[in-house]
Amino acid sequence: MHGGPVRALAVAPGTLASAGFDQSVIFWDLATGRARAVVRWHAGAVNALAALPGGRFASGGEDGRIAVWAGGGEPQRVLLGHDGPVAGLAARDGVIASAAWDGTVRVWAADGTVRVLEGHRGNVNAVAFRTDGVLVSAGFDGTVRTWGPDAVIAELALPQTALAPLPDGGLAVAGVDGVVRMIAADGTVREVLSLGRPVVALAANAPGTLLAAASLGGSVAVLGLPAGRLLHTLDGPGTPVWSAIFDADGRTLWTGGADRRVRRWDAVAGRAIGPVGEADQAAPAEGLDPHGARVFRACAACHALTAEGGNMAGPTLHGLFGRRMGSVAGYAYSARLARGDIVWTPETVADLFTRGPDVVTPGTKMPVQTVGNAEDLAALLRFLERATR
């Protein structure tokens, strides 16, 4: 689970990447629902993700930087040049396109060359490649434009925040007015749905039969294509939904929101499957605090409790209390934790989850997690004291 709203998602065969306001990117193993790696490299919120060939991913952040990842560790490649937050990423045939709040779109070729595209008046919020390979962007100025021969293809009254290419060569676009529109290949604009609250993410499935629209109102609308008719409304905890992506099967939809979770849905049936990394668990073993076990579910995707469980995205917690920070064999710690100047006790663990890992251990790869409820924190400590022996 992230330590803040989940702002972006991307999927590749066997792997889901999620990024958030907590400055982290988490790489999830879709077969197990567990985190493979957690990286905290960006100096600010991570706003955008894109899947690249070979199972790699690109991330773009509030810091204006773009990083290319091969599943953790350090970035394979860093793209510098934007003077404002990166708000959107798209990729096609090894080329990365980025939209930023410096008013530009940049196109990064595999050979290292970059084109800077200027034309929007103000922040550029979204970027996508149409099925014909033409690059398209949408911005605060209410325009949707291509960077081919057609220039501005739609002028809308209010800022546009999300784009999705459609298999028929058209586009879906949405913005702060909560209206989802379809732009046909010939430039015809058609309104298909109004959600009443800003739409910040759009995703179309590979077969071209479904379109998902995520709203700050807390729901996700699933529309049938090509007609654009509303099929389902997916209701979660009622908090803003910031991101959405379909899996390759065309049926599974992943969403991320302000509740800090990545949720999985059957978009055809219109039903929830459950949060990634928090599958239903058996009742805790005798003697373990059941309340604490529920709180620990947010940690279970990255940490095993036993020696046999080994190191995951985070080190095993076996023998946690009395252990010096950064001392588990075989785990690649961040430089801060490798200093080993904290001994884990109930008091130091409580401090970690009260002030946050980013404050207690600055530079850590751990997502920013806090436990604000005193009863939850006490239950978690009781659970860990026995479960990690």
Image (spheres, grey):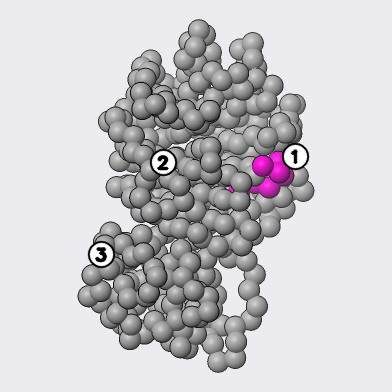
Q: Secondary structure at mark 2?
A: strand
- Viewer-side residue, 161 vs 315: 315
Q: Position of residue 89 (x, y in %)?
A: 46, 33
Residue 207 is inside the magenta segment? no
- Viewer-side residue, 352 vs 221: 352
Disc 1 residue type? Answer: Leu
- Compared with 245, 111 (above or below) is above
Say if mark 2 contacts mark 1, CB within 8 Å.
no
Q: CA distance from mark 3 to mark 1?
A: 49 Å
**Which residue is found at the position 37% from the left and 20% from the top?**
115
Q: Please give the residue where the numbered disc 3 appears in the rendered image.
A: 336
Q: Position of residue 158 (x, y in %)?
A: 47, 24
Residue 253 is inside the magenta segment? yes
Q: Secondary structure at mark 1?
A: strand
- Compared with 384, 333 (above or below) is above
**Which residue is found at the position 28% from the left and 59% from the top?**
363
Relative horizontal placement of residue 370, taking residue 130 as reference (left or right): left
The segment highlighted magenta reads 248-254
Disc 3 residue type? Answer: Arg
Q: Please give the residue where the numbered disc 2 appears in the rendered image.
A: 68
Disc 2 residue type? Answer: Val
**How many numbered discs?**
3
Q: Please give the residue where the numbered disc 1 appears in the rendered image.
A: 231
Quick one: which residue is furthest to the right in this view? 269
Please tell me which of labels 3 and 1 falls first in the chain: 1
Please tell me which of labels 2 and 1 falls first in the chain: 2
How packed mark 2 is, by other alpha carbons closer than 10 Å (few <14, some 14-19, many 20 or more), is many
Q: Position of residue 140 (x, y in %)?
A: 41, 26
**Which mark, residue 210?**
none
